[in-house]
């Protein structure tokens, strides 16, 4: 083992490997007995491909470039496709990212996709999400988001029915509206097996879906209209995150997740006698925050003679897949190397499909036999391109924050089989702040993280107060205290690592994107954290809270700030107190600002405000922008550039040899 300064270790993990590993499969679904999904193509401009797995286990991509099954409903998008198996082969409908129109496609027919919805007056302003093919009426039912003006909040959302025959492609009036627009937000429809009833989740501003939602169930009359549309669960202060209808012999028929006890647990409701009860109760999460539409943390497993058989993703901090059956509360965990499962299940017959990862692998597509509990990887299998000895190994730790509160974090010390640091030298550490902020970070293999740890830079990922996965009480620590609790928790972890000798106190950094970019920037201007960090990397951030409301951002989050910071009567005052753009004079260390130029969630104007505020103050900084990128980076070239720029910043600030990359810091 060679001795070399931390940060300067030679590593086989390249930026190209980081770009290639960005993203994972998603939107799993059944078309007859076949499994279909989408998967990323960073080298193709960040588009997603639609993949078909036939019953003989062969796979193929069914949509050639530039088709991109993805949508922008709520700007974060959601499930973009649905399919049905017919006598002459599969019928698929999907939303195309470029124009947001809904298309029909029959891959075995040899033709091209055919539009089902019209070009709207506002470009890409008629959007669809969570489509369902309803054979009974020859339609596609979906969430429809329709812009009525040029401002980001000039819109309406309803459940809508689009004819499969293409008659609405040139005639907007042929699209039937199933709901009346009284809700600002809705999830896609969940239909009963006989297409006789439907369930959906809805909510209004200023609620976010993890604050309070309504679960509504309706009958479908012979004309395809929703009858007896009523709320059966939820309300203010109760979050319903998922609903499913039918699926088990003799079962009650309606199943949903609710956090009315402080944890997202599972419940049932009987349509006919209006009775209800608990399906699974524990101090664990059986669902998560609804950032995108179409997540599935649980699904019934149809099985003759078996009552209430389910596949469920659950956990506290991490998520495991377990199987339930025969109406018992006994869980059968799925065996295997995976330590985390995403909320994207699919059930076909006795098989359960999901996306699972571990600290030694990214998210793989796993098939589980629901009778035996055995799992096997069927797609996106992880293959080690380097010796796994270069992968970081997480230490799951709980730190103490202000007032003795717990802070959950994953600590990744530098790890490289060929190098160690000089005797007596402590490594630099970077605090990685996840976005959201109502979200979390899981301890799974991240090649970008490994890029840094294998070079001798430690990383700690902090699930600060406000993060999900630890119950509603932990999640609501951030209520009206965004810019305080998150900043304090990250600093408490950084200080603790320095105090115990794990990290060099003079070489601490912080980085984050989106809401994490806010926390990173606020950590440079907060009086509570002055002197903690030597530099920061701020990616597509929120930087001025008063400008992140109404038409200053997208509609989904246009009132999010009220729960995070405070109601309108105190928002301006608190924004001035906490926003980095109002305290740029406190920034004393170098920073790197990275921004996508087409970001509708955190527009470039936010970053440019900070640049104007530090202009001429002598603070070293760099601003790198990326054309064609929206919220989060998807293009391989962008990912390569942003990682090298970050590495170069640390090299300059922490004084070690850096990459072959020029990063010019302006003052």
Image: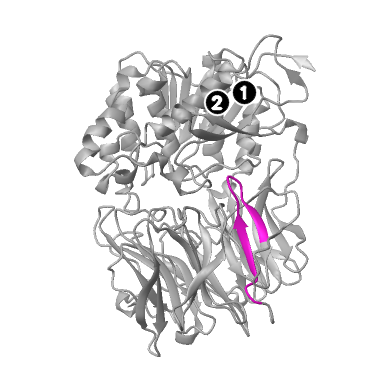
Which range is magenta? 307-322
Mark 1 neighbour class, 10 Å CA radius: few under 14, some 14 to 19, many 20 or more: many
Q: For the residues labelled 1 and 2, say whether their Cβ atoms are less than 8 Å apart.
A: yes
Most distant residue in the bottom direction? 222
Compare residues 289 and 125 and report the one nearer the observer: 289
Query: Going by the image, does 256 lie left or right of 221?
Result: right
Residue 589 figure quarter? top left
* Residue where numbered disc 2 is placed: 430
Q: Relative to 458, say whether 275 is above or below.
A: below
Of 574 and 195, which appears nearest the observer? 574
Residue 6 spot, x, y in % from top left: 65, 17
| 296 magenta-colored | no
At 46% from the left and 18% from the top, the residue drawn is: 532
Residue 415 percent across, percent down from the top left:
71, 26
423 or 272: which is nearer to us? 272
Q: For this view, does 246 lie left or right of residue 478?
A: right
Residue that numbered label 1 is attached to:
457
The residue located at (44%, 77%) in the rendering is 198
Element class at badge 2? strand
The residues tagged by marks 1 and 2 sit, at their Cα atoms, a distance apart of 7 Å
Residue 268 point in image, percent of width and height: 52, 71
């Amino acid at each position: 083992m060679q001795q070399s300064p931390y940060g300067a270790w030679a590593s086989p993990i390249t930026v190209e490997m980081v770009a290639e590993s960005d993203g994972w499969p998603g939107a799993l679904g059944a078309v007859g007995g076949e499994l279909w999904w989408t998967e990323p193509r960073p080298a193709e401009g960040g588009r997603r491909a639609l993949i078909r797995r036939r019953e003989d286990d062969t796979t193929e991509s069914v949509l050639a470039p530039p088709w991109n099954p993805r949508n922008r409903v709520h700007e974060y998008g959601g499930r973009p496709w649905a399919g049905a198996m017919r006598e002459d082969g599969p019928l698929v409908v999907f939303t195309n990212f470029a124009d947001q129109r809904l298309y029909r496609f029959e891959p075995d027919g040899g033709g091209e996709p055919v539009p089902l919805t019209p070009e709207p007056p506002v470009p890409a302003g008629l959007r669809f999400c969570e489509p369902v093919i309803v054979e009974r009426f020859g339609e596609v039912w979906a969430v429809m988001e329709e812009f009525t003006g040029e401002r980001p909040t000039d819109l309406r959302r309803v459940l809508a029915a689009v004819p499969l025959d293409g008659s609405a492609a040139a005639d907007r009036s042929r699209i039937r509206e199933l709901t009346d627009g009284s809700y600002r937000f809705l999830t896609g429809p969940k239909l009963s097996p006989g297409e006789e009833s439907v369930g959906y989740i809805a909510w209004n501003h200023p609620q976010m879906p993890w604050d309070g939602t309504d679960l509504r169930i309706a009958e479908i009359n012979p004309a395809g209209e929703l009858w007896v549309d009523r709320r059966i669960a939820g309300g203010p202060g109760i979050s319903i995150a998922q609903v499913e209808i039918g699926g088990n012999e003799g079962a009650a028929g309606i199943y949903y997740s609710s956090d009315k006890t402080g944890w997202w647990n599972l419940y049932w409701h009987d349509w006919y006698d209006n009775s209800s009860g608990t399906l699974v109760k524990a101090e664990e999460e059986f669902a998560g925050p609804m950032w995108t539409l179409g997540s599935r943390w649980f699904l019934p497993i149809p099985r003759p003679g078996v009552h209430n058989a389910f596949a469920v993703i659950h956990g506290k901090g991490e998520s495991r897949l377990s199987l339930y059956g025969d109406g018992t509360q006994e869980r059968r965990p799925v065996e295997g190397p995976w330590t985390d499962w995403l909320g994207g299940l699919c059930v076909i017959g006795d098989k359960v499909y999901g996306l699972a990862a571990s600290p030694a692998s990214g998210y793989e597509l796993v098939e589980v036999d629901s009778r035996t509990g055995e799992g096997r990887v069927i797609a996106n299998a992880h293959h080690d391109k380097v010796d796994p000895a270069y992968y970081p190994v997480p230490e799951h730790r709980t730190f103490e924050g202000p007032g003795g509160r717990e802070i959950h974090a994953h600590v990744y010390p530098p790890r490289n089989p060929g190098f160690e640091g000089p005797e007596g030298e402590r490594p630099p550490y970077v605090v990685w702040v996840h976005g959201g902020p109502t979200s979390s970070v899981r301890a799974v293999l991240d090649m970008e993280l490994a890029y840094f740890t294998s070079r001798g830079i430690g990383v700690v990922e902090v699930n600060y107060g406000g993060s999900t996965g630890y119950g509603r009480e932990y999640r609501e620590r951030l209520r009206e205290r965004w810019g305080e609790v998150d900043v304090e928790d990250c600093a408490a972890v950084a200080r603790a690592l320095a105090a115990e000798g794990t990290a060099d106190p003079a070489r601490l950094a912080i980085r984050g994107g989106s809401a994490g970019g806010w926390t990173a920037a606020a950590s440079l201007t907060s009086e509570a954290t002055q002197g903690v960090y030597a530099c920061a990397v701020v990616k597509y951030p929120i930087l001025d809270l008063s400008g992140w409301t109404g038409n200053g951002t997208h509609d989904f989050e246009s009132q999010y700030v009220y729960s995070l910071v405070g109601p309108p009567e105190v928002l301006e005052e608190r924004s001035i107190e906490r926003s980095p753009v109002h305290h740029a004079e406190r920034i004393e260390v170098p920073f790197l600002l990275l921004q996508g130029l087409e970001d509708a969630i955190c527009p470039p104007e936010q970053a440019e405000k900070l640049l104007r505020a530090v202009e001429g103050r002598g603070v070293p900084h760099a601003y790198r922008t990326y054309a064609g990128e929206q919220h989060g980076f998807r293009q391989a070239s962008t990912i390569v550039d942003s990682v090298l720029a970050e590495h170069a910043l640390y090299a300059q600030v922490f004084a070690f040899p850096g990459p072959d990359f020029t990063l010019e810091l302006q003052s």
